[in-house]
Image (cartoon, rainbow, N blue to C red):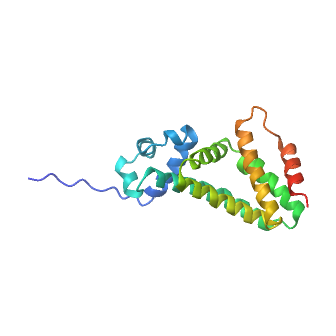
Amino acid sequence: MTAPRRARRHDPGRRDRLVDTALDVIAERGVAAATHRAIARAADVPLGSLTYHFRSLDQLLAAAFTRHVEAVAARFEDRMRAAPDRAAALETLVGHVTGDLLGSPRDLVLAVELYVAAARTPALRAVTQDWMARSRRSLEHHLDPVTAREVDALVEGLVLHSALSTEPMDREQIAHALSRMAAA
């Protein structure tokens, strides 16, 4: 007599849940702690689910960081497109930096974790390259391409500075720096 087959759990949202859980693990413990086992445990799924949905941990991390980047970049794109003039675009940019990028400790940690991981992992470097390109295109609604690239680099530096400094710049200092850089 053969043992009855174990019923398969129908879980159509599992892949998305794994991506979201990977972001949670990264935000809480860092990329180094985002192992297959840690993510599977946090998502309450069998370990094999990860390898079923993702060929490698790098592929899962790329999917997770891409999801994070997509959310942040889409908000910024929409706001910059809606800004009626350069002054409004500058205020939108300041709000983006101080709100979207620095306003949430979780999002700040995710950005820094992505930067560090991308320095070592080509698949994640592609995610950061896409994010920078999207950011520059958004800035180019109101700035020339050279200035947009410089402002984008300043924004990246502000994020790292804020994450690492014991005395990060406040909103007024950030607004001043961005307005000086974006002055035409």
Determine whether, in the image, residue 22 is placed left or right of residue 77: left
Is there any visible trace of residue 97 in the rendered image? yes
Q: Residue at position x 34%, y 55% from top? A: 9
Q: Residue at position x 41%, y 57% from top? A: 53
Determine whether, in the image, residue 76 is placed left or right of residue 109: right
Determine whether, in the image, residue 153 is placed left or right of residue 5: right
In percent of width and height, residue 156 lies at: 72, 49
Figure quadrant of the C terminus = bottom right
Spot the residue most to the left.
Answer: 1
Spot the residue most to the right.
Answer: 184
Is there any visible trace of residue 46 in the rendered image? no
In the picture, residue 138 is in which quadrant?
bottom right
Determine whether, in the image, residue 34 is placed left or right of residue 141: left
In percent of width and height, residue 34 lies at: 49, 43
In the picture, residue 159 is in which quadrant?
top right
Q: How many marks?
A: 0
Q: Residue at position x 53%, y 50% from top? A: 121
Observer-nearest of 108 and 136: 136
Observer-nearest of 148 and 18: 148
In percent of width and height, residue 97 lies at: 76, 50
In percent of width and height, residue 1 lies at: 8, 53
Is 68 above or below relative to 169?
below
Observer-nearest of 141 and 144: 144
